[in-house]
């Protein structure tokens, strides 16, 4: 063992001198200043209090260090942590000066020269728990002729239990989800979305919501004026036929998508005069309608038909 210590003692002494010299060079080298923007973290000793507002979330710190240490300083994790003690128990504003000792530094050769801002103000509030109703945040509209049926909307869960500043939560009755896109939808669908909460408020129950969004075809009414009344089959007697009225107004009900495409000329309204002789008649109006469309008025529409000879 002693032989190992005394062997190559010359090289060992040289290595030691070089190491000591390098250390003195690093420490004794001229210091350089550099400014870093670092995050500011507030730690609360009281579990019943929280920070609702802060005047500065980051601080600018000027650091002084030897040149060889400055190179790696940019990649070092540096942060400022200020602890608010248990003596602070009431809500209100609290100001403090950040001390150099509250900034974590990667080495003892580095020192804090300046901290900006010099003073930081935080607003403290009582920490409370509150239940909030969840509201889906819909964006856009379904396709033309379709609508969202609010009565059939389902969410699981439909409320979230939250914890946060009293001044924030007391003003809230509900919380919205992430946006749910409805643009161009023609079918019902499911989405799982997160509940959006303001800064300082966190969920303490399930915040992922399963939403069933019912999309249904939309139905409505549309009025068609001046629809001509046609004769389906001519009467047995030859002569002139007068129809009163010879044009009608029809109110149709059905799919909005179909109704938007319909024009009065596409509707067929007629009376059947087959086998009728000269005279005056009340004939039922018959209407041929496209699929998914019906007459609003279910009662019969009567057309007066007067059949006259040509000499009259």
Image (spheres, grey):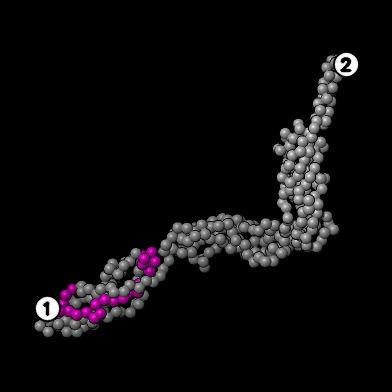
Between discs 1 and 2, the one toward the N terminus: 2
Q: Which residues are magenta?
A: 233-260
- At horizontal 74% and vertical 46% (from top left) the residue drawn is 60
> How far from the left and from the top, in percent, is residue 270?
24, 74
Q: On the rendered structure, is 110 left or right of 188?
A: right
For residue 238, the mark is 1
| Quadrant in which residue 35 is drawn | top right
For residue 6, the mark is 2
Q: On the rendered structure, is 87 left or right of 222?
A: right
| Vertical placement of residue 108 versus 53, above or below | above
Label 1: which secondary element: loop
Nearest the eye: 177 or 111: 111
Label 2: which secondary element: helix
| Vertical placement of residue 5 versus 295, above or below | above
> How far from the left and from the top, in percent, is residue 13?
85, 19
Is residue 240 in the magenta section? yes
Note whether residue 82 is visible: no
Q: Total number of numbered labels?
A: 2
Local packing at callout 1 (Cα closer than 10 Å; few below 14, some 14-19, many 20+) is some
């Amino acid at each position: 063992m002693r032989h190992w210590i005394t062997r190559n003692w010359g090289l060992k002494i040289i290595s030691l001198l070089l190491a000591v010299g390098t250390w003195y060079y690093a420490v004794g080298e001229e210091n350089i200043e550099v400014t870093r923007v670092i995050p500011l973290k507030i730690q609360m000793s009281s579990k019943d209090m929280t920070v609702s507002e802060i005047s500065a979330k980051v601080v600018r710190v000027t650091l002084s260090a030897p040149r060889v240490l400055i190179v790696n300083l940019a990649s070092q994790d540096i942060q400022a942590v200020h602890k608010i003690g248990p003596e602070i128990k009431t809500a209100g504003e609290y100001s403090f000066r950040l001390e150099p000792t509250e900034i974590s530094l990667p080495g003892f050769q580095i020192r804090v020269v300046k901290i900006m801002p010099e003073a930081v103000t935080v607003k403290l509030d009582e920490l409370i728990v509150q239940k909030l109703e969840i509201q889906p945040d819909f964006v856009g509209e379904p396709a033309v002729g379709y609508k969202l049926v609010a009565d059939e909307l389902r969410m699981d869960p439909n409320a979230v239990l939250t914890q946060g500043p009293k001044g924030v939560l007391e003003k809230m009755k509900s919380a919205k989800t992430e946006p749910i896109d409805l643009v161009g939808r023609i079918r019902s669908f499911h989405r799982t979305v997160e509940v959006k909460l303001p800064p300082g408020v966190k969920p303490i129950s399930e915040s992922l919501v399963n939403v069933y969004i019912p999309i249904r075809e939309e139905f409505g009414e549309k009025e068609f004026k001046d629809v001509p009344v046609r004769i389906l089959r001519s009467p047995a007697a030859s002569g002139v036929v007068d129809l009163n009225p010879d044009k009608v107004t029809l109110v149709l009900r059905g799919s909005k998508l179909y109704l938007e495409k319909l024009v009065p000329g596409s509707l067929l309204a007629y009376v059947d005069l087959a086998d009728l002789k000269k005279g005056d008649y009340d004939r039922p109006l018959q209407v041929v309608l496209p699929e998914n469309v019906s007459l609003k008025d279910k009662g019969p529409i009567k057309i007066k038909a007067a059949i006259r000879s040509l000499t009259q």
